[in-house]
Image (spheres, helix red, strand yellow):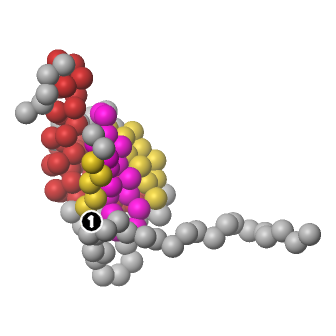
């Protein structure tokens, strides 16, 4: 019986609908998430946990998990999936900081965030 040797082939990258990739090779996921974490820190979020390699990464912040794959940053909150191109790190950081702050406020006070 012949068994394949070596690493399994990686699936083709598929971007979510509406994400237009920037020309060229996507930036490394680990670099994108490092920049995102830095920008989130400037928004006051410090409890961030993540792992990444050049192809795939994940960053957890209070009550939200962000995935970086290909040219996209993706997260889900209240059943709504949000996807932004990885070239919009500043916008993603602003949206995620507001979302995490509202989620944290909701969890601690029982009231919806602003």
Q: Is residue 7 left or right of residue 84?
A: right
| Farthest front residue in view | 79
Location of mark 1 (residue): 85
Q: Residue at x 51, y 73 (%)?
A: 12
- Can you say which quadrant of the picture contains the N terminus? bottom right
Q: Nearer the viewer, residue 32 or 11?
A: 11
Q: Nearer the viewer, residue 5 or 35?
A: 5
User: Which range of residues does the magenta coloring cover?
Assistant: 62-77
Q: Find residue 92 and report its image quarter.
A: bottom left
| Farthest top residue in view | 109
- Can you say which quadrant of the picture contains the C terminus? top left
| Farthest right residue in view | 1
Q: Residue at x 69, y 66 (%)?
A: 7
In the rendered view, tell whether residue 59 sits above or below residue 82.
Answer: above
Residue 23 locus on image (x, y percent): 30, 81
| Farthest bottom residue in view | 23
Q: Residue at x 27, y 48 (%)?
A: 80
Q: Main secondary structure of the magenta part?
A: strand
Residue 88 locus on image (x, y percent): 21, 63
Q: Is residue 22 left or right of residue 105?
A: right
In the rendered view, tell whether residue 19 sits above or below residue 43.
Answer: below
Residue 49 covered by magenta stretch? no
In the rendered view, tell whether residue 24 sits above or below residue 37.
Answer: below
In the rendered view, tell whether residue 49 sits above or below residue 89.
Answer: above
Query: Is residue 35 at least partly visible in the picture?
Result: no
Residue 61 locus on image (x, y percent): 31, 38
Q: Find residue 110 and report its image quarter.
A: top left
Query: Is residue 47 at least partly visible in the picture?
Result: yes
């Amino acid at each position: 019986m012949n068994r394949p040797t070596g690493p399994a082939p990686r699936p083709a990258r598929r971007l979510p609908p509406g994400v237009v990739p920037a020309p060229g090779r996507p930036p490394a996921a680990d670099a994108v998430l490092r920049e995102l974490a830095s920008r989130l820190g400037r928004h006051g979020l410090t409890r961030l946990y993540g792992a990444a390699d050049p192809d795939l990464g994940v960053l957890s912040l209070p009550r939200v998990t962000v995935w970086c794959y290909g040219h996209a940053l993706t997260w889900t909150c209240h059943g709504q999936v949000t996807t932004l191109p990885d070239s919009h790190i500043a916008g993603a950081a602003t949206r995620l900081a507001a979302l995490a702050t509202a989620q944290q406020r909701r969890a601690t006070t029982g009231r919806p965030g602003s």
